[in-house]
Amino acid sequence: MIDIYKELKIPTMINAYAAFTVLGGSCMNDTTIEYMASASREYVDIRDFQKSLHERIAEMTKNEASYICPGAMAGIYLATYAAVARKYGKNVRYLSKDQISKCEVLAFKGQRNPYDRAIEQTGVRTVDFMYPNMWDAPNASHLEHSITENTVAIYVLAGARNVFPTYMPLEEIIHVANTRNIPVFVDAAAQIPPIETLWKYNQMGATITLASGGKDLGGPQATGLITGSKEFINIIVEHGFPNYGIGRMFKIGRESMAGIYAAIKQYLEMDSEEYNRRMEDEVAYIGEVFNDSKIFKYERDFPNESGQPVPRAFLEIISTQTDCIEIIELLKRNSKPIITMSEGRNGIFVNPMTLRTGELEIVISALKKIESEILLRS
């Protein structure tokens, strides 16, 4: 069996924190890998393959249409250009830089993030809307007066931990947008679970929802999914891969397309109640193990760092003999490095979502060993 990491002498890790891109996103299962291998063995008309996959995924996810892209941020880029094309009624390849630069996307100031930079990379301006604090919270009137003749879309970041005091309910945003014929993009890249994320915002009236394929969904890391309005996604298809122009730089292989299809198919078949029970049981087990600890104090944290409705354990450091920086470093020195974070608190998070079979026991064993070593200092 080939082991590329061993060949390159790169140490593999236990991810006890989250499905972050810099850690590889997620690990695909054998079924998904088999689908990808199957797609790699034959030549195929890519457009036919895309059309069939997009129709099948749309049907599975209760949407009018879908589009596979190389990551959710690429989806924001493609959607922004589609909004510009929609405004002018023509493909962006026929538009000048000046025409594109006049266009604006509204975004809540309190929700700005590194990923929405994809909007400005198209040449379109991002216009911050309202304040990132408790004062003068936005309402329908504020939003209506922020929309101008140059507004081509409204960008909304989903997730319980991304909702700030200045955030309007999505229903209100959609109502205002619909009266002005403005598309609404919901960035839900990390909001699976629940799988309903792929259709619930669109059923509320959002134009599209963007999701990552390489997080808990368990698809290839460099994949994303756009679901929603058939009319709008048809414009994305016109601009996207394999067409020349902007879409060509967002090339996505047939293997990756097969992989995200397989991942979605399996996720929809998964018993979500059993999944949630397992997450709760593993978090509770961590609490039981460290119930009488003189080093760690257990806390159930919910929702997790991305606002997903999944619990994780937080182990606050209550000893004066150590701190989170040392604990994180000691975990990295484990025989198989263990990665976790503190998020600015004096403690560490342990997230069962990214732990594979048998790894929770390894993490606990490493923490118990560290605990014993610290107690010997006293």
Image: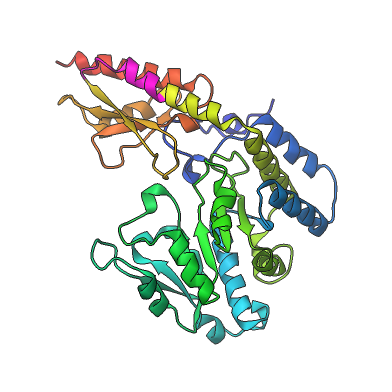
Q: Is residue 73 left or right of residue 234?
A: left
Between 91 and 144, the one lying in front of the other is 144
> Where does the image place residue 182, in percent across and percent down from the top left?
53, 73
> Where does the image place residue 268, in percent across and percent down from the top left?
64, 38
Q: Which residues are magenta?
A: 283-294
Q: Is residue 235 left or right of residue 140?
A: right
Residue sitting at 54 percent across and 39 percent down?
216
Between 163 and 363, the one lying in front of the other is 163
The quarter of the image holding the N terminus is top right
The quarter of the image holding the C terminus is top left
Residue sitting at 78 percent across and 57 percent down?
51
Between 345 and 236, the one lying in front of the other is 236
Residue sitting at 53 percent across and 71 percent down?
178
| Corner quadrant of residue 351 | top left
> Where does the image place residue 226, in percent across and percent down from the top left?
61, 56
Residue 286: in magenta span = yes
Above-or-below relation of 80 to 50: below
Residue 13 seen by the camera: no
Above-or-below relation of 114 to 276: below
Residue 7: in magenta span = no
Residue 217 seen by the camera: yes
> Where does the image place residue 101, in percent across and percent down from the top left?
50, 81
| Corner quadrant of residue 288 | top left
